Image: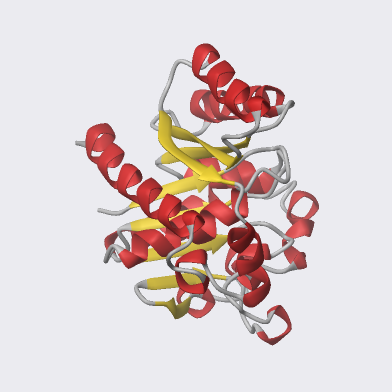
Amino acid sequence: MGRIIAITNQKGGVGKTTTAINLGAALAEANQKVLIVDFDPQGNATSGFGIERDEIEHTIYGALTGNCTMDEAILEDVNDHLDMVPADMNLAATDQEFVDVDGKNEILYKLLTPYREKYDYILIDCPPSLGTLTVNALTAANSVIIPIQCEYYALEGLNQVLNTIRIVQEGLNPDLVMEGIVFTMYDGRNKLSQQVVETVKNNFNGNIYETLIPRNVRLAEAPSHGMPITQYESSSSGAESYRLLAAEVMSKGDAIYG
């Protein structure tokens, strides 16, 4: 049975989509069958795989609203062992459109649960906000990964997302597990990066990944070429870091889920 992992942080610009794309690609490279669900109206995970949003017929929005099936929305083999459900700006309307819909927070859960038989990992790239989309993602997920940028306001963003996770655990998904925190844009030469890592470790009683995702030029360039870093610059420090993170995710999963 595959695992559904929500990748979320209510603070933008923390490497959330970068982590969804490149963790997914690294897991797929390790012969895991992966589905990435772009659940952000900006659609950056979609374009990060070179998918032209104007040419997409079906999206996750269509599946949510019943205008298409999940099978129709899934784009197969966007990378080896990796499929994707794309997104577009229509997703931004869900807060208003679903306000009076019964079971509105469990729609994604119902859509994704049957696909746990097909995929080893389903990664949900969440929007940087608290709303219907994020709550749906956390309700559907087995666990959560929180990317944190190594900068001054990191703890503030962490507290917000942890509070959201607690709310979902109490009301909608009591089995939701905190998979771990991953530090992004780390610069070992920068004292602030080191301080952020130490501060979070001292204040957070939970799983923290050992892998530090570096601030890396190739990693920043890859999305504009429509490729994950493992494909764009396979030998770069960014690619190697996401491979290490994928190995940790696989081993931590064995420890968490048995």
The x, y position of residue 132, in whole percent, is: 68, 45
Is residue 163 toward the left or the right of residue 114 in the image? Answer: right
Looking at the image, the residue that sits furthest to the left is 258
The x, y position of residue 5, in whole percent, is: 44, 47
Viewer-nearest residue: 138 or 96: 138
The x, y position of residue 83, in whole percent, is: 44, 72
Q: Residue at x 65, y 60 (%)?
A: 220
Q: Residue at x 55, y 47 (%)?
A: 137
Above or below residue 31? Residue 122 is: above
Looking at the image, the residue that sits furthest to the top is 202
The x, y position of residue 46, in whole percent, is: 62, 70
Snapshot quadrant of residue 251: top left
Snapshot quadrant of residue 82: bottom left
Is residue 31 toward the left or the right of residue 155 in the image? Answer: left
Viewer-nearest residue: 98 or 194: 194
Position of the C terminus, as image quadrant, is top left
Q: Is residue 114 visible?
A: no
Total count of labels: 0
How did the renderer colour the structure? secondary structure
Q: Is residue 173 visible?
A: yes
Q: Residue at x 36, y 48 (%)?
A: 244
Q: Residue at x 55, y 25 (%)?
A: 197
Above or below residue 209? Residue 19 is: below
Looking at the image, the residue that sits furthest to the bottom is 55
Is residue 175 toward the left or the right of residue 39 in the image? Answer: left
